[in-house]
Image (cartoon, rainbow, N blue to C red):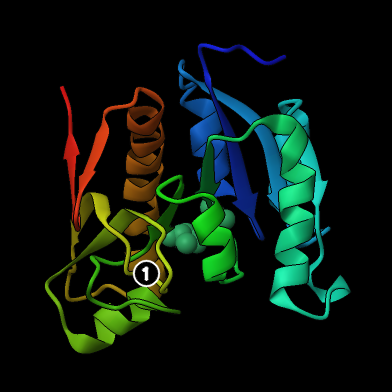
Amino acid sequence: MQDKNKTNVAVFVSGSGSNLQAIIDAKIEPANLAVVLSNKHDAYAIERAKKHKISVEIVNHKDFETREGFEKEIIKRLDKYGIELIVLAGFMRVLTPYFVGKFKNRIINLHPALLPSFPGMHAAKQALDYGVKYAGCTVHFVDECVDTGAIIIQAVVPVENDDTEDTLLEKIHKEEHRIYPEAVKLFCEHRLHIEGRRVFIRS
Ligand code: GRF
């Protein structure tokens, strides 16, 4: 049911959905988790959504010849939910400027590195191979490019000598599950204020 005091949120997924789970578990008071949208019919995240009685929409990108066609269908599906915030949680499609423009400053993403270091795929491996002493994760607004939008929250984890990609990712995921719900909450409380590249958190 829609509640006009709450922010209607769509979570976009493609895979396991552990961050979706963290957002569900956080029971963010000012957020209404209106819909989970997946581009993959077998994403485990869909099970998590169904278990919590959240509506699910599946739009397979392979059914469309162009990215714009795919995105137009997404926009059509979202229409009935009155979405105010889109949360990308392991959504493995790059959104075009067309889509980003429709939801300007209303799409957030989570990246498993301390941006602007290590954008793109396999960020934890990139960090480990580079030899950094600290890694982490970043929640940011989505702009027209990949992993470049204004930064909302970051969390840092130390890299130990015996870390592998898996152990480092485990530490990063733990922080992701803490900061992503926090960022969603701040957005829904209307406490995020963007000035150029800087995001200020109002108290
Ligand atoms: C996370 O590590 C996030 O940083 C990246 O995709 C992963 C999604 O994991 N963007 P999950 O599907 O939420 O478990």
CB of mark 1 near ligand 1 (< 8 Å): no
Q: Can residue 155 be seen from the camera position used here?
A: yes
Q: Is residue 185 above or below residue 94?
A: above
- The residue nearer to you, when weighing 189 against 21, is 189
Q: Is residue 90 above or below residue 189?
A: below
Q: Which residue is drawn at 57% across and 34% down?
A: 9
Q: Nearer the viewer, residue 53 or 148?
A: 148
Q: From the viewer's perspective, is 199 left or right of 43?
A: left
Q: How many labels does the image show?
A: 1
> Which structural element holds mark 1?
loop
Q: In which quarter of the image is the N terminus?
A: top right
Q: Position of residue 147 (x, y in %)?
A: 37, 69
Q: Which residue lies furthest to the bottom in this view?
A: 129
Q: Is residue 152 left or right of residue 22?
A: left
Residue at screen point 23% across, 65% down: 114
Q: In this view, does 62 lie above or below 80?
A: below
